[in-house]
Image: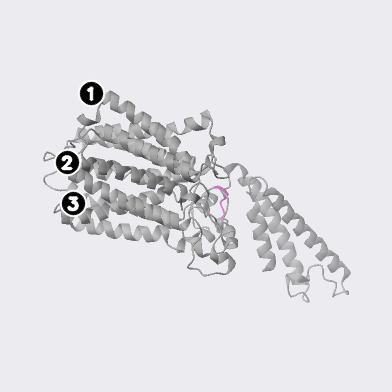
Amino acid sequence: SPSSMGREPSAKCAGANGGSNSERPVGSWQRIGASAALTMFVVAQTVMIRYSRDSDGNLPYNPSVANFLNELVKLLVSAVTWWIYDKDSEYNGVAGVTLSTFSLFAVPGAIYAIQNSLIFYALVYLEAPTFQVVASLKIVTTAILFRIILRKVLTTVQWIALLQLFLSMVITKMGALLSPQQSQDRQNLLIGAGILFVNAWLSATSGICNEWLVKYQDAKAPLMLKSIQLYFWGTLVNLIAWVVTDTNEMSLSSQGISTLVVCIILNNAAVGLSVAFIMKYADNIVKCFSTAAAVFISAVLSSYLFNFPLDLPFVVGLLLYSTSFFLYFGKHNTVLHAHGFNDTAFFFFAYCGEADYPKKYGGDDNNDDDGDEDSKKQKQMRQRPTIEIGVVEEVKQDRARILSSLNDLELSVSNRSSCTSASAIGSTTDNSDGASEVRWRSLSSKINEELEIMKMGSGDGGRKAPFAEMVSTERKV
């Protein structure tokens, strides 16, 4: 509901209380709804823009004006929504707005403006199919920055899924790209591809920056208040672009704004607001999958509306997209996270040199959409913080000390045949061997001390907490 816009989705789920696994936690439905809405609005955007072109394929209106009105509509909708639902809430976010935080939202606004300019120049040098193929590179750049900047841990299967998603977009356009009608000058191809390469990184940077601002900058502030700040800068930048590029009189009547164009502007505003909710309740990777789905749906609609041919590369691309969707969001990633089959595991393997070391650790579960049915405790068990390179040696020493104590304990277990479980530590049932009893108590105390050290270490960013968990488990075994 709109009243929950400014609050983080609850991590509590029915499974934690023994309820039905079919129930979803608060925030899950917002995530699904925002993704479906984005796909639907992007499909409508593609079809309406295609209808709005004239016989020569040009737009009969000024794109700068359309972008300005688009940002203005989003600004007004966000302001009205915040005023109605969040202004009188317990924390409306106004107290957290300062000049410095407000200025942060200018960064994605400026990057978006640069992106629009670069896309225009890229289209000058590249044919449409070539443009669409090279532009798909932003999927890869988004995934890289998603991991590096936001530190979201992905499983190895999820990385494969993202590569498949990129290939599906490329293969879908291969039929048109290899068509005999398509001819591309090599120099223009290199220039256009270079422009889109830069644009791909700018697109990823703006998306990741936007997600960070929405989720982590004053996290309790309402989403609509943050949208107001972002769209203010977007409106200002596009107004400047309109003034610079328009040589005619600054009036809407001379900009070719028709009823269809108004529908396009309103639909584009809905696209932007849907992205805002995805940044709040999901992430940039979900956005990539949603927009990719819109490509296939738009192609199918175009085949009926504009006689657009659906060739074999399109079918292959659709198949790759379907499998990549399953690989990325499938429940198998929960198991892979729990057993350490993720990029964090590769990190440990590279720096620690122990083949079994990564298997003790899972990955960050923040971006795992498959754990809705698990209990809160199971989620916490799967979550592992990222250990930095600087503490690897210290961590290895701690682990060696723990394992040494465990080995001593195992030797004592083998020497005391009367003991059948770990609960016998500290037991006084066997009084015939006083020295063995003292040894048992000493080892038990030592293990507990090591566990306390690990727990105390967890206060430093929580980086050593997994060792206490590991030792506790091995003691039970």
Discs 1, 3 touching: Cβ within 8 Å:
no
The answer, for residue 416, to whether it is visible in the render is yes
To which residue does mark 1 refer?
249
Within 10 Å of disc 1 (Cα), the crowding (few <14, some 14-19, many 20+) is few
To which residue does mark 2 refer?
53
User: Where's residue 214, x and y in %?
Assistant: 48, 42
Res 125 → quadrant:
top left
Q: CA distance from mark 1 to mark 2?
A: 23 Å
Closest to the observer, 376 or 449: 376
To which residue does mark 3 refer?
175
Discs 2, 3 touching: Cβ within 8 Å:
no
User: Where's residue 126, x and y in %?
Assistant: 21, 37
| Amino acid residing under circle 2 | Arg
Closest to the observer, 127 or 74: 74
Tag nearer the camera, 1 or 3:
1
Picture layout, residue 223 above or below residue 24:
above
User: Where's residue 364, x and y in %?
Assistant: 53, 53
In this rendering, position of residue 131 left or right of residue 81: left
The answer, for residue 148, to whether it is visible in the render is no
User: Where's residue 255, x and y in %?
Assistant: 21, 31
Which region is colored magenta? 351-355
Which is nearer the N-term, disc 1 or disc 2?
2
Which is nearer the N-term, disc 1 or disc 3?
3
Res 391 → quadrant:
top right
In this rendering, position of residue 418 left or right of residue 218: right
